[in-house]
Amino acid sequence: MLTQEELEYFKTKLLARKEKIETTLDKTSHEINDIRELELNDEADFASVSTDTAIDNAIIEQQRQELAEIDLALDKIKKGIYGICEMCEEPIGKTRLEVKNFARYCIVCREIVEKNKSKDKQ
């Protein structure tokens, strides 16, 4: 089980990451809007902007997913269930939480979830 001090440490890290993502999302949204307002002179300009926008959109989507995971982790801290695996209900190792502060599964259960995801894609 995590101590109160450890919970505060992870909460601080999660909040800092959340703020960084929100700032990045805001900046990227402004950049995309600026690009939309550009006058594109030829097909090469349009193709370049289209590729960049697709990449930006993929990054935005990934960051929104991470933001949702962070919000879930912060909610778990409030409820007193942070650091508990959603599958086996055993504690998630501190080392794993250090690497991925919003981890939902212990390492063993994460491997099971990943294997099931890859089977679903086939």
Image (cartoon, rainbow, N blue to C red):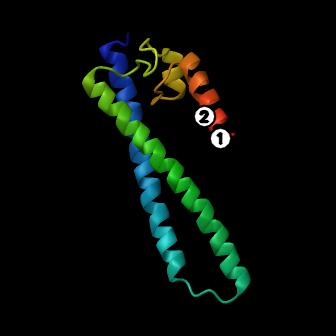
Q: Residue drawn 46% across and 20% down?
A: 87
Per the image, the residue denoted by label 1 is: 121
- Percent coordinates x, y for residue 113 in the rendering: 56, 27
SS for dot 1? helix
Per the image, the residue denoted by label 2 is: 117
Query: Along the line of sight, which residue is nearer the eye, 24 or 96?
Result: 96
Q: Is residue 34 above or below residue 83?
A: below
Q: What amino acid type is highlighted by mark number 1?
A: Lys
Judged from this view, the residue extending furthest toward the right is: 44
| Res. 14 image quadrant | top left
Say left or right for 70 vs 45: left
Q: What amino acid type is highlighted by mark number 2?
A: Lys
| Proximity of marks 2 and 1: CB atoms separated by less than 8 Å | yes
Query: Along the line of sight, which residue is nearer the eye, 22 or 73?
Result: 73
Query: Along the line of sight, which residue is nearer the eye, 63 or 16?
Result: 63
Q: Is residue 13 above or below residue 90?
A: below
Say left or right for 52 vs 96: right
Position of the N terminus, as image quadrant, is top left
- Percent coordinates x, y for residue 41 in the rendering: 66, 89
Query: Along the line of sight, which residue is nearer the eye, 71 or 19?
Result: 71
| Res. 84 image quadrant | top left
Q: Residue drawn 63% across and 67% down?
A: 52
Q: Which mark is residue 65?
A: none
Q: Residue drawn 30% across and 16% down?
A: 4
SS for dot 2? helix
Say left or right for 65 vs 12: right
Binning the other alpha carbons within 10 Å of mark 1 as few (below 14), some (14 to 19) or many (20 upward) gives few
Q: CA distance from mark 2 to mark 1?
A: 6 Å
- Percent coordinates x, y for residue 76 in the rendering: 32, 27
- Percent coordinates x, y for residue 82 in the rendering: 36, 22
